[in-house]
Amino acid sequence: DAKTTQPNSMESNEEEPVHLPCNHSTISGTDYIHWYRQLPSQGPEYVIHGLTSNVNNRMASLAIAEDRKSSTLILHRATLRDAAVYYCILIGKGAQKLVFGQGTRLTINP
Amino acid sequence: NAGVTQTPKFQVLKTGQSMTLQCAQDMNHEYMSWYRQDPGMGLRLIHYSVGAGITDQGEVPNGYNVSRSTTEDFPLRLLSAAPSQTSVYFCASRSRWPNTGELFFGEGSRLTVL
């Protein structure tokens, strides 16, 4: 299964946009890019996913590079409740062994 | 729907004791998996299953057994607990069809082995 690389930590200010990067240089054509976040003392929760085109939902936006070797999760206006660990993972056709990386720990300053 | 339900939420064991962490999902998901998360660390895959009667090892399977007799349940067994197994355990499930199926996680089971 393809692996992803994310920065260990990032910091941003409240009410500012946050761009969380993820590199996946060995992505295959059928791999979907999924993002999850884990709030303190909770289980991970789904945020967004995409294949080739940029995606928007009520939580965030996902920007996917044209060559699909990287993607960026965008929180348009961060709040203190967005402080969490964010994970990027590739889920392909017939995916079985779903391995998470270390994720990015996002700190939001008031 | 209840989603993914894990029991117990907290458990303290002594070294050498055995126990089973329960995981149940009511979404008819074919895929289920167990992860462990040590303090300040990411998720590590222990075992996974793509359907009833089918299980396979993840990244860190040693010391754990699983079985999948029904679609709904995927219990994780610790045969002889060790302090190194102190961790938070998360169960997850997803539908394999369509391929876009997201992972649903339980709330976690916090295990301490003394």
Image (cartoon, rainbow, N blue to C red):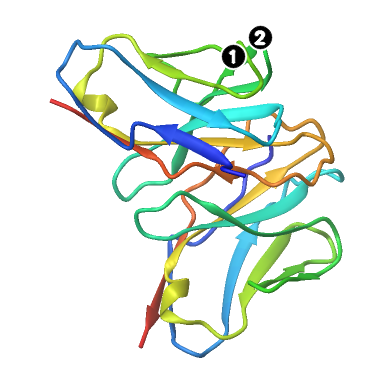
Respond whether the residues carrying marks 1 and 2 are from the same subunit.
Answer: yes
Q: Who's the residue at 44% across and 87% down the image?
A: A14
- Identity of the residue furthest to the front in this view: B1
Q: Amino acid at mark 1?
A: Arg
Q: Residue at x 62, y 44 (%)?
A: B1
Q: Examine the image and state in which quarter residue B112 appears.
A: top left
Find residue B74 and report its horizontal and vertical position in percent: 54, 21
- Residue A95, located in which quarter of the rendered image? top right
Q: How many marks?
A: 2
Q: Which residue is mark 1?
A: B68
Q: Which mark is residue B53?
A: 2
Characterize the local packing of mark 1: few (<14), some (14-19) or many (20 or more) Cα atoms within 10 angstroms: some
- Image position, residue A74 (x, y; %): 64, 75
- Which residue is painted at 62% across and 35% down in the image? B93
Where disc 1 sits, the SS reads loop
Q: Is residue A10 above or below residue A68?
A: below
B22 left or right of A53 in image: left
Q: Earlier in the sequence, mark 1 or mark 2?
A: 2
Q: Position of residue B78 (x, y in %)?
A: 34, 15
Image location (x, y in percent) of residue B23: 49, 28
Marks 1 and 2, how far apart in space?
Answer: 5 Å
The chain identifier of the residue carrying mark 1 reads B
Q: Is residue B2 above or below residue A110?
A: above
Q: Are marks 1 and 2 in contact (CB under 8 Å)?
A: yes
Identity of the amino acid at label 2?
Gly
Q: Does residue A16 appear left or right of residue A25 in this picture? A: left
Near-viewer residue (B19 or B49): B19
In the picture, measured across the screen, residue B86 lies left or right of residue A58, that is left
**Secondary structure found at label 2:** loop
- Horizontal side of B30 relative to A110 (left or right) equals right
